[in-house]
Image: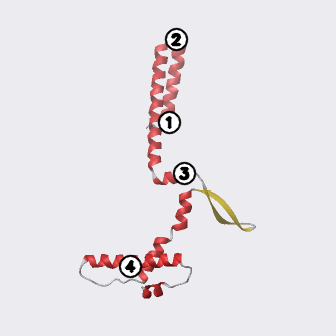
């Protein structure tokens, strides 16, 4: 792709050639310049279209180009103190912020209260891992469905 200076210089040269062709009534040169500029315009539009297609496939661009349908509240400090401001944002960002701590919480509970045991067979590690995951999931579901406060240790012992 040509630089801006090269494109500007080419346009200036074509403009001077067009002026001299119009003065001499040489329409063959005028048609040739018109075809040249149409081809250049098509090439530039093709470049823009391919750039747009690659932009649409980019996951970051998908978030940035998504419609702002949700709102989230943020506290902003100003000279008057703290103010709550509602900002428009993408729904997927709101959902991510709402649920982003789930995996970290699950890993924390699984690592603190594990039933892992040493073994020489690979499948035993996998079975212990699945048991840990099942116990943590059971605890999270029980705590979600029941409003009683129960510690993970007490739930672990009761199972």
Residue 139 vertical position relative to residue 79 in the rendered view, above or below: below
Look at mark 2 in the image and give the residue it sits on.
Answer: 25
Look at mark 1 in the image and give the residue it sits on.
Answer: 5
Look at mark 4 in the image and give the residue it sits on.
Answer: 132
Picture coordinates of residue 82 (x, y %)? Answer: 71, 69
Residue 152 vertical position relative to residue 75 in the rendered view, above or below: below
Query: Which element is circle 4 on?
Result: helix
Look at mark 3 in the image and give the residue it sits on.
Answer: 66
Query: Which element is circle 1 on?
Result: helix
Q: CA distance from mark 4 to mark 2?
A: 88 Å
Query: Which element is circle 2 on?
Result: loop
Count of picture labels = 4
Q: Residue furthest front?
A: 146
Picture coordinates of residue 111 (x, y %)? Answer: 41, 80
Picture coordinates of residue 80 (x, y %)? Answer: 75, 67
Q: Could you tell which of marks 3 and 4 lies nearer the N-terminus?
A: 3
Q: Residue furthest right?
A: 80
Query: Which element is circle 3 on?
Result: loop
- Tell me the residue at 46%/14% (across/down): 28
């Amino acid at each position: 792709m040509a630089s801006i200076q090269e494109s500007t210089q080419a346009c200036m040269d074509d403009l001077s050639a067009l002026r001299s062709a119009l003065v001499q009534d040489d329409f063959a040169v005028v048609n040739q310049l018109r075809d040249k500029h149409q081809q250049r315009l098509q090439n530039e539009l093709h470049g823009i279209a391919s750039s747009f297609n690659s932009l649409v496939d980019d996951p970051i661009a998908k978030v940035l180009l998504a419609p702002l349908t949700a709102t989230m509240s943020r506290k902003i400090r100003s000279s008057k103190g703290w103010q709550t401001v509602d900002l428009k944002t993408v729904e997927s960002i709101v959902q991510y912020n709402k649920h982003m701590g789930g995996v970290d919480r699950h890993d924390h509970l699984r690592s603190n209260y594990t039933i892992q045991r040493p073994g020489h067979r690979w499948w035993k590690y996998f079975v212990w891992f699945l048991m840990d995951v099942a116990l943590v999931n059971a605890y999270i579901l029980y705590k979600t469905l029941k409003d009683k406060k129960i510690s993970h240790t007490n739930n672990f012992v009761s199972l």
